Amino acid sequence: MQRTLLERLDPVTDDVVSLVLRGADGPLAPWEPGAHVDVALPNWLTRQYSLCGDPADRGTYRVAVRYDPLSRGGSEYIHRFLRPGRTLDVSLPRNHFPLVPAPRYLFLAGGIGITPVLPMLRAATAAGIPASLVYAGPSVDAMPFAGELRAAYGDAVRIVATREHGRPDFDALAAGLEPGTLVYCCGPASMLAAAEAAFPAGRLHAERFQPLPRVFAPNTAFDAVCARSARTVPVPADESLLDALNHAGFPVPSGCREGVCGSCELRVLDGEPEHRDDIGAPEGRMYACVSRALGPRLVLDL
């Protein structure tokens, strides 16, 4: 973890605040567009936020947080109780939504989904790569950074206030897509579904804040063999691997507990995991919050 000082907390819209976190012990770890960090809050919760500042600025990180009325305590604490001057521990950046090289880009964002897209658009423009953004939200006043985007990128950014103009026509955008263009989309589930229906799968990169509803076979019990500790942890059918390990004294980091943030990644030495995450675990890795074993045991690098 990196120790940071909350330098600024600024309202961006009525329900979104921007946090500027300055490294308390010197430069912060480098990151690339699409990355996110875990922020450990003073109320003992850890939450994940996309980095939306400038990767060239090693002194600070910027994130933005929308208030969720159904908050599990993260966004409510930030909006109601967090104040500048507070020290916060922040993880090293992780990136499951990297900007792949392409001759041109089309970015699609909805609401707070603009946060990972901001540095992507900045990077593409700085590199001289043609890029455009379609940014949708209920009204301009409710859309974080809409003014900043218009001022910086002009006609390359199309702001769509859906209450007035309806949703963007993704089918028309797909029909006019130039060869080689990659499409990046982040926003609510309805926007992601519309993008997946309109754009070819090989051209579309999407990031989800919530996992897709999916059905898996019933849970079965298995053993987690911790190779470095020479211990075996039974994982009952009604308990996650993450919880079983934590209860056995292995403090595996965790954040979302939904298979979308990647903070609970483990190295698998033997056995076959049943991957239930939404970000695609790398070869030889698994996410302990949701994934399980396809056989009677897994050997883990713990």
Image: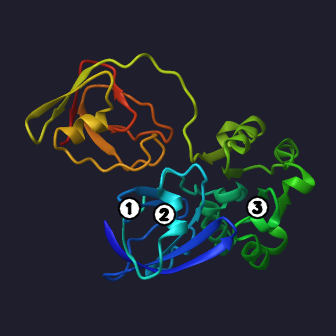
Direction front: furthest residue: 80
Which residue is more in the foreground, 88 or 77? 77
Q: Which residue position is annotated with label 2?
A: 77
In the image: residue 113, left or right of residue 4: right
- Compared with 26, 29 (above or below) is above
Q: Earlier in the sequence, mark 3 or mark 1?
A: 1
Label annotation for residue 43 = 1
Query: Gap between marks 2 and 1, in whole Å?
Result: 8 Å
In the image: residue 13, left or right of residue 139: left
Q: Earlier in the sequence, mark 2 or mark 1?
A: 1
The amino acid sitting under disc 3 is Leu
In the image: residue 79, left or right of residue 130: left
Residue plotted at (69% across, 51% down): 182
Using a 10 Å C-alpha cutoff, classify the residue at mark 3 as few (fewer than 14 neighbours), some (14 to 19) or many (20 or more).
Answer: many
Residue 101 rendering spot, x and y as whole percentages: 60, 57
Q: Earlier in the sequence, mark 3 or mark 2?
A: 2
Q: Which residue position is annotated with label 3?
A: 133
